[in-house]
Amino acid sequence: MSWRNLAYGSKQVAESATTVIPIKDAPQVDISNVPKNDGAKVYNILEYLRKVPMHQPVTIRDIFQHTGVDLGVDDQVDQRLKNNPKVRVIGDRYAYQAKYDIKNQIQLLKMLDRTPEGIPMEDLMDCYVDVERDLQRLARSGEVICVKNAEKGAEVFYPRDMSFLVDVSGITTAEPGSYITHSSQDVTNEIRRGDAIRIGNHWFRVSGAVKTSNASRPAPFAGMSSKSVSSVRDPNTSKKVRYLFKFDKDHMPLDAPFPDANNHTIASMDRWDALPKRGPKFQMTKHGCTNDIRELWQNTMHNFPTDRNEFYKKLVQAGLTTQSKVDASRRQSKRRLKEDKKKTRTRKQRDIKISNQHLIGTELGEILAKGSEEQFTLGAVQFEKN
């Protein structure tokens, strides 16, 4: 078929041309809401593909049903979609292509473990539908590290290789449906608002929810004031912030209601902000040293001897070790240092020479005679002829 026929459209060409049949099924969206702009159409299709579970490939009919865009008729949108780096075309189907092939929380944690340099939030947002919720929960419990850029506000997630957990003083009583727990000992010197705290098998943050004119109970996780699991300073040094819940020797507030036996975090209608009268008792755990121990270290670190010998002397005086253990440690260090200085001697392979006079006239001798005049190879060993 010539280009002239294609250009001017002869009758024969018109009869042989492929006829595009529009999809007759009515879409699930209002046709009046379908944008006219091609870029907006592509955006709507990408949003639909992103929300498809497991980013499974879908047909043109599926896209039409959910967006009102018929790719069988709209060639320009179809071409722009195929050229988009966020779209995988599998035969006649389309699927979303995220930067990382992550489909669930387990794969998310494995990818972070393989990426010690961290992954920005913007590169993870489109991996699967609930990825933002999972990242928030993982950062809230301290399973991953979240660092927020102070200037740009961008969040970067890092793996937490090892966790250092310590017990908090006292035993806490928690009542399902309540934001308030009670500790048998005053823990205000050990934890601060915003710190991550584990009660039983559940992680919370000490609530930092701010008091507003609305007296209703806060939304879950509204009191998560910091990304860090362990604060280094009081978040309210100015004392100008008015918090919704008390935090004193009797009250320890949480950023979400304590769950019930079915693991449902639903706030109680009448006791959501009351001290628990009854309920299970738990040991509390936090990340890193308690704040009183950290403060003790900061106040005394200037007394820490920089000379190692003086350091060992202080340890012996404090009864934290013995002189015999110190001497044994020194001998072991010297022995290790001496072994590191030793250099392994490189052995040179000696040239192997043999006489083959006894092989003259034998079959093996004839085989060896076919080699070069100076040397031959037998297996992996090279021999010189004499």
Image: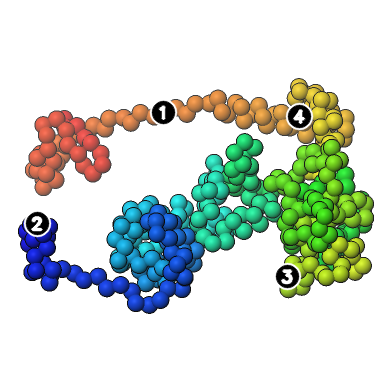
**Mark 2 secondary-structure assignment:** helix
**Mark 1 secondary-structure assignment:** loop
Q: Is residue 150 left or right of residue 34?
A: right
Q: Which mark is residue 196?
A: none
- First in residue order: circle 1 vs circle 3: 3
Q: Is residue 307 above or below residue 199?
A: above
Determine the residue positioned at 76% across, 22% down.
307
Inter-mark Cα distance, 1 to 3: 68 Å
Q: Position of residue 235 (x, y in %)?
A: 79, 41
Q: Position of residue 43 (x, y in %)?
A: 44, 56
Q: Is residue 17 above or below residue 182?
A: below
Inter-mark Cα distance, 4 to 3: 58 Å
For label 2, the crowd category at 10 Å Cα-Cα, with few meaning under 14, some 14 to 19 and many 20 or more, is: few
- Give the residue at mark 2: 3
- Give the residue at mark 3: 264
- First in residue order: circle 2 vs circle 3: 2
In the image, which is nearer the foreground, mark 4 or mark 3?
A: 3
Q: Is residue 278 left or right of residue 329?
A: right
Q: Position of residue 151 (x, y in %)?
A: 62, 36
